[in-house]
Image: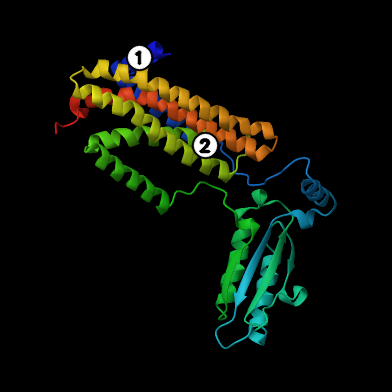
Amino acid sequence: MAVLLHRLGRSAYRHRRLVLGIWLVVLAALVTCAGVFGGRLDDRFTVPGTESQRALDTLGRTLPEASGADAQIVFVAPEGHRVTEARYTAAIARAEATAAKAPQVKAVMGPAATGAVSADRSTAIVQVQYSVQRAEVRPSSLDVIEGAAEAAEGNGLRTSVGGSAYGSNGVHIGPSEVIGVAVALLVLVVTFGSLLAAGMSLLPALLGVAVGLAGLLALTPAVSISSTAVTLALMLGLAVGIDYILFILSRHRQQLARGIDPRESIALATGTAGSAVVFAGSTVIIALAALGVIGIPFLTVMGLGAAGAVLVAVLAAITLVPALAGFAGARLTPKPG
């Protein structure tokens, strides 16, 4: 293994433009496939063989309108007023009528029918029942529900919408993820004392995560993949990616400090530290893939998706790091003192 990885590191260093180009082409191809053929994420969780799942299956066969997704519109009257006042009840009734016309809506139940009014009469809830599961709810239908809520706000009511129909159907990278990457970069800069070395640690990890997530999303038309599986793959891929890259990069910089030629140094680092990376990654992949033994579909997909992200992280560590080290050359040598 060490000899094979040594040769791989030396070859990646020598053909660094080709290696980097292959990774970029693969990423572009997967992103294109995900954009053109990728479907929506599916957050329907089933646990075959359990009593609760059999009950849900029976409900879906005998009363499908009660087993679909649901949405709620919450109406709050202005301070000092009640939702039972004539103008507010009229606004709520109009919202009910609008929601009932939304595509895929099976039934709309207002507070008059359900009694969903708070004790102080300041808040009321309208229930919207869909005839389809959340993953099948069309955005246009949700737009109608939101439009009904906004129309009621014109009459002085404060509104908000929610329910299972509004679950996540995509990958959202928000400020928290960006802040996390920025903090990781800061820690790496402080640790290495070099912006170049910190970037060398982070860039292959981010590229590996991008490839892993794009590959996962490209499979959505053929496999039911949940947003939880994507999130887990993102977290594990980034965490182990940085960790594995640090193994090889730290060994490479130590050897550069001893005066070893950059090409031979990265080959040795890939052969020695890279062996540890492959072993560690293999154990993680096996452990995650073992989630399939449980026999719960969504756990199986989560495990295999995360295992795929870890596999890509290992490949990035043993190929991308030597290639990028070739571009950096001797500039990765730590400064004396």
Q: Reading the chain from its start, which is encountered first: label 2 or label 1?
A: 1
Q: Nearer the viewer, residue 336 or 130?
A: 336
> 309 or 50, which is in the foreground?
50
Q: Is residue 126 left or right of residue 334?
A: right
Q: Name the residue located 75 percent from the left edge and 77 percent from the top edge.
A: 112
Where does residue 101 sit, x and y in percent of width and height? Answer: 70, 64
- Which mark identifies residue 6? 1
Q: Quadrant of the N terminus?
A: top left
The answer to whether residue 84 is above or below residue 262 is: below
Kind of residue sitting beneath label 2: Ala
Q: Quadrant of residue 152?
A: bottom right
* Amino acid type indicated by mark 1: His
Q: Is residue 142 left or right of residue 332?
A: right
Q: Which residue is mark 2?
A: 34
Circle 1 residues within 10 Å: few <14, some 14–19, many ≥20? many
Q: Label 2, label 1: how many angstroms apart (C-alpha)? A: 34 Å
In percent of width and height, residue 57 lies at 80, 47
